[in-house]
Image (spheres, grey):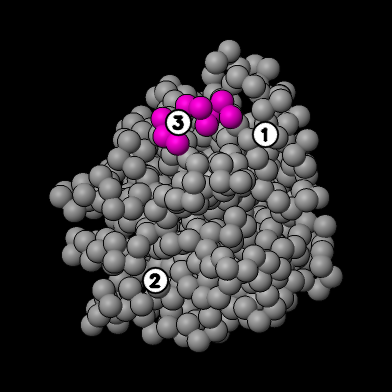
Amino acid sequence: MKLAVLASLVLACAPIAHATTVLSNAQIHTLNAQQPTAAAMAWDDAGRILALGETQALLLRYPEAQRIDAANAVVVPGLIDAHAHLLGLAMALTGVDLVGADSKDDVLRRAQQFAADLPPGDWLRGRGWDQNRWPEQAFPSAADLDAAFPDRPVWLERVDGHAGWANSAALRALAQNLDGDWQPEGGRIERIDGKASGVFVDGAMALIDAVAPPPSDALRTRALQSALAVAARNGLTGVHDMGVSLADLALYRRFADAGKLTLRVTAYADGDNAALAALCAMGRYRHASGRLDMAGVKLYADGALGSRGAALLADYDDQPHNRGLLLTAPAALRAAMVKARDCGLQVATHAIGDRGNRIVLDAYQAVLADAAGGDHRWRVEHAQIVAPGDIARFKTLKLIASMQPTHATSDMPWAGARVGKARLFGAYAWRRFLDAGVPLALGSDFPVEPVDPRLGLYAAVSRQDIDGQPAGGWLPEQRLRADEALRGFTRDAAWAGFAENSVGTLKPGYRADFVVLDGDPLRVAARALLDLTVLSTWVDGEPVYQMPSHFVRPAAK
């Protein structure tokens, strides 16, 4: 079936003036309850859907249209990642990839191979290490890097982006003495016998970031081009980018101005900083292309579970006397929320631990006050470990739980050790949120997790890793149905970004953002979701990705 699709899902070789295009002979899931399926779809040259229906009816209705024969391929609305870091992915692509490294030796091997192509003196940067995958399951130290890199500064971010690992050359770049028992606000310097070990958690990472040379504009431009290509070939037509600075927004705008922004970026300002001030001064930002929008702010309550920075109501089960970190003091968090509220902006707040989530719920309740019953769509990002009694508060406050299915399957080997069995009741509890009437917006948090939304769909319906473990799934009662998972990456993600009247569903008047697959994500077995092939990805009725082996020719009339 794949070869037939590759040979027949086609575009014209040379530009042909067509006001309308009809994609026919498809299995279309619209996610529109009034017309859930169709065999054909027509759109105009502005990329707006005109009609959906049966193939012959649409071909008769639009006889002069360019025709694309889908050869029975499956079409779904464009996939939207409701929590990601597109420029984070871009920069990760420029450094050494440490994802999946199963030991410190593996990290060193990869780092040395990458450094072989770096100019002398340049910092070596990378991302993706996870001490939970190593035999010792303990944080590394600068000494582990020094033998291989005695002079070149090295700065390697943990997979979650909430901790970093420096060598002694990088530590020497700091102007301040790190010894003692003091800690920076919202962060933690790991120490051995009172001296900085080389690992910096959450807010402490800013110490190294302040002295590491920033990437050039040229590098950021090349990196964003690469990240957009990765997103398109994985079927993404939209991303909610969490934590976008004014400089980041300017880069996105340059791409959008040039017609090179190949997906829709719903940007959230990077905390109570310059981007939020600009939004308050000038109002919501919208690019004329419809590809770039900023109308919200992303705040941080706590850190991450993997680096024991998530704020817990009780001690970590595997580290007594540690209850995690608050990245933002509660008073400052509320002040930023008040500012956003008064500027008419949406608030999305990172909260992973049960204490972090409760602080956010308390703050939202106080700041929204009587407006909590309105259509504010404020969000809690991750909502990973939630006290059981707090889940109902999401519904009462009309909040969105923005969750990432692959976090559960990545964290399941060690999450129980971190928080204990009792707290797992509210851990990665997608089903409990849905059953409580809380809307879910699904994403990946890439580059923390892989970009591929098929992994998210699979994790959502199976609660298993790619090897099918554990049998029956981890905390299997929290699984989602296939249709719920797909809605989380399409219609519900669009709603979470106030875009439900233009994307996330295939219906007349909406943008022709869609993905063509070689199988049906609503009908295949869970394991087969991993084997689905993205044949092409379309934004505004134009392909932003096609499999290289697609033949390019007009379909016969």
Mark 1 = which residue?
A: 143
- For image coordinates 41% across by 30% down, the residue present is 175
* Residue at the (30%, 71%) spot, across then down: 376
Give, as a three-letter code, the residue at label 1.
Ala
The residue to which callout 3 is attached is 174
Q: Is residue 439 magenta?
A: no
Q: Nearer the viewer, residue 480 or 387?
A: 387
Q: Nearer the viewer, mark 1 or mark 2?
A: 1
Query: Magenta segment range?
Result: 168-177
Which residue is pictured at 32% across the width and 63% down the height?
333
- Quarter where residue 337 is shown: bottom left
Q: CA distance from mark 3 to mark 1?
A: 17 Å
Above or below, 40 against 158 in this view is below
Q: Which is nearer the eye, 65 or 124?
A: 124
Relative side of 311 to 145, left or right = left
Residue 360, label in figure = 2
Task: Give the Cα distance between marks 3 and 2.
Answer: 34 Å
Q: Between residues 388 and 193, which one lies in front from this camera angle?
A: 193
Numbered disc 2: secondary structure: helix
**Snapshot quadrant of residue 209:** top left
Which disc number belongs to residue 20? none
Identify the residue at horizontal 75%, vertical 39% (top origin).
Answer: 104
> Is residue 306 left or right of 401 when viewed as pictured?
right
Q: Looking at numbered disc 3 in the image, what kind of residue is underneath it?
A: Leu
Disc on the earlier residue, 1 or 2? 1
Q: Position of residue 6 (x, y in %)?
A: 71, 40
Q: Tell me the kind of residue under disc 2.
A: Val
